[in-house]
C-alpha cells in the first residue's frame, strides 16, 4: 500500500483538530513564548483578564483581555530585569497575582516571587517580593496560589544546600495573608536531598537525571490539609499539611525507573479519589518517550495504584513533527470564578501533540474526546507547535499556549 | 460565543463530538455512481470522507484530484475519497487512526456507498454496535436511491429493494426524466406506502445537495424538539385507532406511545422477546423512552436484532413526556407489539403500561 503521508493540505506540521475549534489566536506582540503559568482574573468592572507567565526572558508576564473571547486584546506586557531570570509561573486570586522568579545560576537575583496588585490590570503594582535567593538557590520555579492566603512554592532557599546540585528546590509554604510581608510557615523536602539529612541521597535516574525537586505543589481549599506534590524524579507525593509547619508524607508513588522520570503535576479528583499525574517530556525527537499521564486510584492514600494512562496517538507519528512530544501540563481545576472544574474531563498539553481532552468517566478506560494541534507557528525553532500549558474557563473555552512563538490559542469544544 | 450554544457542563455529552455517518444505498443501477460523482465535486463536501467500492468507478477527472494513492484520493474541494478495504469496521477505524495521526484531512463527516446488492442493515448494525466505532462515529442517515425506471418492477420482484426503502431516512428518486409524470407519482405513492416517514426527493441528473443526506440522527444530548422530530420522522401518524390510512402488504410502520413511565427492565425485556421471536422482521426501531426515575428520555435505536447501547438525553425536548417508539417491521402488526408490551409490562411491573 502506498504511503499516504500527504493526503492533507499543508504537509506534516499542519493543524489537526477534533471537536476543538480555533476561535482566536494572539501572538502576544511577537513574544508568543509562554511558560506554565496561566490564570484568569475577573476584575471589579467585569472584565476577564487572562494572565500568562512567559517561558523565558525578555518578557515577564502578559495580561490579555478576553472578555470577548473571539477578540483577545493584550493590555499589558512586562519585562524582566535581566536575561538570566525567567518567571514561568503565576497565579491570580482576586486582584492579587503571584509571579515566580527562577535564575539560571545559583546566587542571582531576583529569585523567589513577587506579589502584584492587579486591580488596575493595565498597571500591575508591586506589593512585595519574597526573596528566596541564596548561595545554592535559583529561586522559584512554580507557584500555586488559589486561596489568597498561602503560596505553595517550589523554590530553593538561602539556608538550603542540596546533596546534589540538581536537587536545589523543595516545597515551601508561604503565608501571604499580609501580602506586604510574605512569611515562610512550613517546608518539606525529599529525604536525603539536603546536606546534613540522616537519610542517604536518593539514587539518580539511570538514564535521565532530572533531579529530585518538586514541580507542581497543588493545594485545594476543598481539601486544605493535603498537598499534592510532583517531585520530578522523586515521583508523586501526598503530604498532610494539616499542620503547615510540619508537612507529613501520607502517600507516595514512584514509577521511575523503569519509566523516564520527571513527574510534573499531581492533579487530584477530590470527590472521586483519583489522581491524574503528568510527566514532562524534556527531550526532543522522542528521546525520552514515553512521557505519560497516569490515572491513579488514590482512595487509599498510602497505597496509590496506577489504573490507566491517557491514550495518546502513536509517538512515531508525532515525533516526526519535530521538538518535544509527550505529556506536560494540565488544567488543574483551580478554584476561582472563571475556572472550569470537572471530575471527569481532563485537558492536557503534549508539546507538538497539541492540547487534548479526555473523558475519565470510566477511570480504567480514559477516552480521548478532542484535540487541537496548531500548525507550526511562524519561525518555529523546532518546526512545530510546542503547546506548553492550558487553562479552561467556566464556559469550557480552552486557552492553550505555545512554548516558543505561537502565543495564545483560544478554542471552543463540541463534546 | 454563538447564540445557539448552551452553557457547557462539566461532563461530556455522549453524542456531541461523534463523527456522523451517512449511508447511501440503492439497488443495482439506481444511479449511486452518478450521484456520488456529482456529489463529490460539490464545495460543501470539504472535510467529508467518502468510502466507495472502487475509486475508478466514480470517474473523477484527474484535474480535480489534489493527491492520490492506491486507496485514497484528496479532491481539490477538500473531500477525501477512499476505497472500502477489508470490512467496514477496519476501514472506518483506519480512517480515524490516520486522521488522528495527521496523515489525512480532518474529516468531520463520513459518507458510505454500499454495494448495489447490499442489504443496508448489516452496515447500520456495524455502526450501532461495534464498540470501537461507537466511540468515534454515529449513524446519521440512511439514504436509499430509487431508480424511477426499474424500481416499480424491482419492488415487486425482489425483497431487498423493499427493505432498502423501508430502512431509509431519506429517499432519492433517480432517472425521473425517463418516466412520465404519472409513473413518477405512482412510484412516490408506492414509496410512501412502504416508508411513510422518509422524505422523498427527485434528483435531476443525479444532483442532490449534501444537506438532504445529513443531519437526521441526534447530534447532542440536549437535543431540541425539532431535532428529535427530524430523527423520528414526521410523515403519517396513525389515527386514534392506531390505523394508518394506507398500508403496504409487507412493511408496516407504526408508532407506539405510552403515557406512563416504563420500568427499564420491563422495557428491555419486551425488546428482547421481540427480537428473539421476530428479530429479522424488526427492520428498524427508534424512539424516546420515558424511564421511571430518569430525568431525560432514553434514546433507543435498533436494526433487526441489534440495538445501539442506550443513551440518556439531558432533558425532554418538550413538555410531552410520552414514550414514543417508531417501528418499521416486515409483517409484524402494531397490535402484536402493543400486546407484547402490555403483557410483559403487566407481568414485570405489576401494573398495566
Image (cartoon, coloured by chain):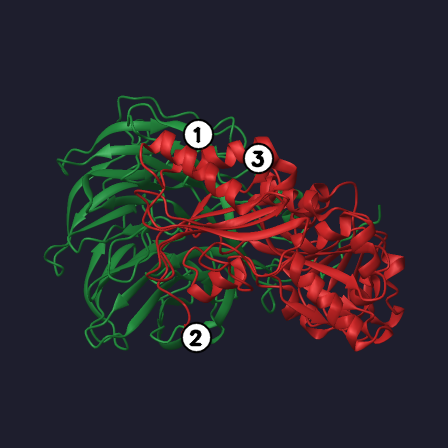
**Which quadrant holds residue B153?**
bottom right
Mark 3 Cα within 10 Å, few/some/many (few <14, many 20+)? some
Which hue belongs to chain A?
Answer: green
- Picture coordinates of residue B204 (x, y %)? 78, 75
- Mark 1 highlights which residue? A307
- Mark 2 highlights which residue? A70
Q: Is residue A73 above or below residue A258?
A: below
Q: Nearer the viewer, residue B134 or B249?
A: B249
Tell me, yes or no, whether dots 3 and 1 are on the same chain: no
Marks 1/2: CA–CA distance: 39 Å
Instruction: Locate residue A202 relative to residue A314 in the image: left or right.
Output: left
Which hue belongs to chain B?
Answer: red
Give the chain letter at badge 1: A
- Picture coordinates of residue B102 (x, y %)? 66, 54
The residue at 31%/50% (across/down) is A333
The residue at 75%/59% (across/down) is A7
Instruction: Locate residue B152 relative to residue B316 in the image: left or right.
Output: right
- Picture coordinates of residue B263 (x, y %)? 36, 38
Mark 2 Cα within 10 Å, few/some/many (few <14, many 20+)? some
Q: Nearer the viewer, residue B245 or A128?
A: B245
Mark 1 Cα within 10 Å, few/some/many (few <14, many 20+)? few
**Which quadrant holds residue B198?**
bottom right
Q: Secondary structure at mark 3?
A: helix
Quarter in which the N terminus of chain B is drawn = bottom left
Q: Is residue A32 above or below residue A285?
A: below
- Mark 3 highlights which residue? B275
Marks 3/1: CA–CA distance: 38 Å
Amino acid at each position: 500500500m502506498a504511503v499516504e503521508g500527504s493526503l492533507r493540505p499543508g504537509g506534516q506540521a499542519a493543524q489537526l483538530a477534533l471537536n476543538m475549534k480555533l476561535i482566536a489566536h494572539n501572538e502576544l506582540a511577537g513574544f508568543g513564548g509562554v511558560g506554565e503559568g496561566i490564570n484568569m482574573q475577573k476584575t471589579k468592572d467585569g472584565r476577564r483578564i487572562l494572565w500568562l507567565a512567559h517561558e523565558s526572558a525578555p518578557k515577564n508576564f502578559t495580561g490579555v483581555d478576553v472578555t470577548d473571547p473571539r477578540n483577545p486584546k493584550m493590555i499589558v506586557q512586562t519585562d524582566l530585569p535581566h536575561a538570566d531570570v525567567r518567571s514561568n509561573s503565576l497565579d491570580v486570586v482576586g486582584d492579587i497575582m503571584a509571579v515566580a522568579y527562577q535564575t539560571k545560576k545559583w546566587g542571582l537575583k531576583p529569585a523567589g516571587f513577587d506579589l502584584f496588585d492587579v486591580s488596575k490590570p493595565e498597571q500591575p503594582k508591586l506589593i512585595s517580593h519574597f526573596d528566596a535567593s541564596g548561595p545554592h538557590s535559583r529561586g522559584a520555579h512554580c507557584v500555586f496560589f488559589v486561596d489568597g492566603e498561602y503560596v505553595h512554592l517550589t523554590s530553593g532557599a538561602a539556608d538550603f544546600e542540596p546533596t546534589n546540585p540538581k536537587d536545589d528546590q523543595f516545597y515551601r509554604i508561604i503565608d501571604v495573608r499580609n501580602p506586604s510581608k510574605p512569611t515562610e510557615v512550613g517546608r518539606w523536602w525529599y529525604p536525603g536531598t539536603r546536606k546534613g539529612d540522616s537519610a542517604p541521597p536518593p539514587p539518580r535516574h539511570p538514564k535521565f537525571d532530572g533531579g529530585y525537586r518538586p514541580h507542581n505543589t497543588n493545594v485545594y481549599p476543598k481539601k486544605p490539609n493535603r498537598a499534592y506534590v510532583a517531585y520530578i524524579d522523586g515521583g508523586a507525593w501526598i503530604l498532610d499539611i494539616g499542620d503547615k509547619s510540619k508537612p507529613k508524607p501520607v502517600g507516595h508513588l514512584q514509577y521511575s525507573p523503569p519509566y523516564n522520570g520527571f513527574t510534573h503535576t499531581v492533579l487530584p479528583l477530590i470527590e472521586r479519589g483519583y489522581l491524574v499525574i503528568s510527566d514532562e517530556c524534556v527531550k526532543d525527537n522522542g528521546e525520552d518517550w514515553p512521557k505519560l499521564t497516569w490515572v491513579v486510584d488514590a482512595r487509599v492514600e498510602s497505597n496509590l495504584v496506577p489504573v490507566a494512562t491517557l491514550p495518546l496517538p502513536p509517538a512515531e507519528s508525532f515525533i516526526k513533527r519535530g521538538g518535544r512530544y509527550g505529556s506536560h501540563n494540565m488544567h488543574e481545576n483551580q478554584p476561582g470564578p472563571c475556572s472550569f472544574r470537572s471530575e471527569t474531563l481532563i485537558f492536557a498539553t503534549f508539546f507538538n501533540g497539541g492540547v487534548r481532552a479526555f473523558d475519565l468517566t470510566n477511570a480504567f478506560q480514559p477516552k480521548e474526546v478532542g484535540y487541537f494541534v496548531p500548525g507550526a507557528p511562524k519561525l518555529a525553532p523546532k518546526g512545530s507547535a510546542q503547546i506548553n500549558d492550558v487553562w479552561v474557563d467556566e464556559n469550557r473555552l480552552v486557552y492553550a499556549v505555545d512554548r516558543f512563538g505561537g502565543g495564545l490559542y483560544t478554542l471552543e469544544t463540541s463534546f | 460565543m454563538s447564540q445557539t450554544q448552551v452553557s457547557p457542563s462539566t461532563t461530556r455529552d455522549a453524542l456531541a463530538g461523534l463523527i456522523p455517518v451517512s449511508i447511501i444505498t440503492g439497488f443495482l443501477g439506481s444511479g449511486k455512481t452518478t450521484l456520488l460523482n456529482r456529489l463529490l465535486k460539490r464545495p460543501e463536501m470539504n472535510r467529508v470522507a467518502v468510502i466507495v467500492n472502487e475509486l475508478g468507478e466514480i470517474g473523477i477527472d484527474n484535474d480535480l484530484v489534489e493527491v492520490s494513492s492506491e486507496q485514497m484520493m484528496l479532491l481539490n474541494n477538500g473531500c477525501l475519497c477512499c476505497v472500502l478495504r477489508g470490512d467496514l469496521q477496519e476501514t472506518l477505524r483506519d480512517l480515524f487512526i490516520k486522521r488522528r495521526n495527521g496523515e489525512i484531512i480532518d474529516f468531520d463527516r463520513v459518507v458510505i456507498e454500499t454495494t448495489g446488492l447490499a442489504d443496508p442493515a448489516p452496515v447500520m448494525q456495524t455502526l450501532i454496535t461495534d464498540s470501537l466505532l461507537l466511540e468515534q462515529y454515529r449513524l446519521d442517515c440512511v439514504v436509499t436511491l430509487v431508480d424511477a425506471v426499474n424500481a416499480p418492477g424491482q419492488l415487486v420482484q425482489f425483497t431487498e429493494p423493499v427493505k432498502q426503502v423501508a430502512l431509509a431516512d431519506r429517499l432519492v428518486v433517480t432517472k425521473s426524466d425517463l418516466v412520465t409524470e404519472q409513473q413518477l407519482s405512482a412510484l412516490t405513492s408506492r414509496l410512501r406506502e412502504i416508508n411513510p416517514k422518509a422524505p422523498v426527493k427527485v434528483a435531476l441528473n443525479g444532483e442532490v445537495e449534501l444537506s438532504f443526506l445529513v443531519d437526521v440522527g441526534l447530534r447532542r444530548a440536549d437535543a431540541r424538539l425539532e431535532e428529535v422530530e427530524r430523527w423520528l420522522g414526521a410523515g403519517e401518524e396513525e389515527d386514534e385507532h392506531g390505523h394508518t390510512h394506507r398500508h403496504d402488504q409487507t412493511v408496516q410502520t407504526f408508532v407506539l406511545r405510552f403515557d406512563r413511565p416504563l420500568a427499564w427492565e420491563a422495557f428491555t425485556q419486551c425488546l428482547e422477546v421481540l427480537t428473539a421471536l421476530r428479530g429479522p422482521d424488526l427492520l428498524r426501531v427508534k424512539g424516546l423512552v420515558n424511564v421511571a426515575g430518569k430525568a431525560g428520555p432514553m434514546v433507543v435505536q435498533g436494526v433487526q436484532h441489534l440495538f445501539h447501547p442506550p443513551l440518556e438525553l439531558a432533558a425532554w425536548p418538550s413538555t410531552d413526556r410520552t414514550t414514543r417508539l417508531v417501528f418499521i417491521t416486515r409483517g409484524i402488526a402494531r397490535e402484536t407489539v402493543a400486546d407484547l408490551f402490555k403483557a410483559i409490562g403487566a407481568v414485570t411491573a405489576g401494573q398495566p403500561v
